[in-house]
Image (spheres, rainbow, N blue to C red):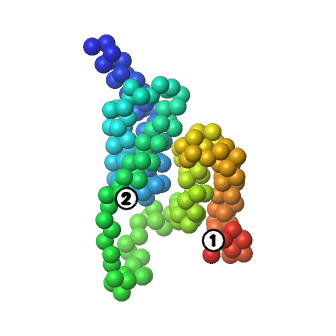
Amino acid sequence: MDAVASRQRQFDALVRAHTGDLFRYAYWLCGDEALAQDLAQETFLRAWRSLDTLRDTAAAKAWLITILRREHARLYERKQFDTTDISELELDDREALTPEQIGEDAIVRAAMQKLDPKYREPLLLQVLGGLSCEEIASELELSSAAVMTQLFRARQKLKALLSGSAGEAKAYGMS
């Protein structure tokens, strides 16, 4: 009975320490609050089932982020996208926009979505996940030097997009 209580305490500590970071990362991945909560919960469910495989508690955050990324990817493996005829779309439907879509984080989110995934992923893992370059390199199966280069380029591209400089955006191949 003592082993079960110890496992429960370890899991509770993981949940308390990483819920906020996992939710923020999930939200940036999917852009939907309810789906982000579901992703975080599914991540913790899978973590509970595999808790015995976690050998180094210092690596718990990277481990959880890996689980979350895989859960997010599974959504798209199963998802069947509906196709809509473009003539049915209302191009100027401003009432459908939420305050979040109009605010500053929507501007940053839109700019980040324009980044090539090879630049967006490491940036999200560092900024939202709080992972080190070495952890990102391990997660993405890249060298640390490649991660540092991609992070540098991601920031430059994001800066160009947010400054609205068409010339800078063209220089980075984004227009």
Q: Left of 80 or right of it: where is 145?
A: right
Q: What secondary structure is found at the residue carrying circle 2?
A: helix
- The quarter in which the N terminus is drawn is top left
Q: Nearer the viewer, residue 2 or 34?
A: 2
Above-or-below relation of 117 to 10: below
Residue at the far bottom in the pictured view: 87
- Counting from the top left corner in percent of width and height, residue 120 is at 57, 57
- SS class, disc 1: loop
For discs 2 and 1, the disc positioned in front in the rendered view: 2
Left or right of 152 on screen, residue 13: left
The crowd level at tag 2 (other Cα within 10 Å; few <14, some 14-19, many 20+) is few
Q: Quadrant of the C terminus?
A: bottom right
Answer whether residue 36 is visible to the viewer in this image: no
The residue positioned 33% from the left and 68% from the top of the image is 81
**Residue 5 numbered tag:** none
Q: Residue at x 37, y 52 (%)?
A: 74
Q: Give coordinates of residue 88: x percent, y percent.
A: 33, 84
Q: Which residue is mark 2?
A: 76
Q: Is residue 61 left or right of residue 11?
A: right
Residue type highlighted by circle 1: Met
Sequence-earlier tag: 2 or 1:
2
**Where on the picture, by quarter, is residue 114?**
bottom right
Q: What whole-number distance in Å separates the C-alpha atoms at marks 2 and 1?
A: 25 Å
Towards the viewer: 123 or 13: 123
Q: Is 108 above or below relative to 170?
A: above
Furthest residue in direction top, as rendered: 2
At label 2, the amino acid type is Tyr
Give me the residue at 69% from left, 68% from top: 172
Which residue is identified by label 1? 174
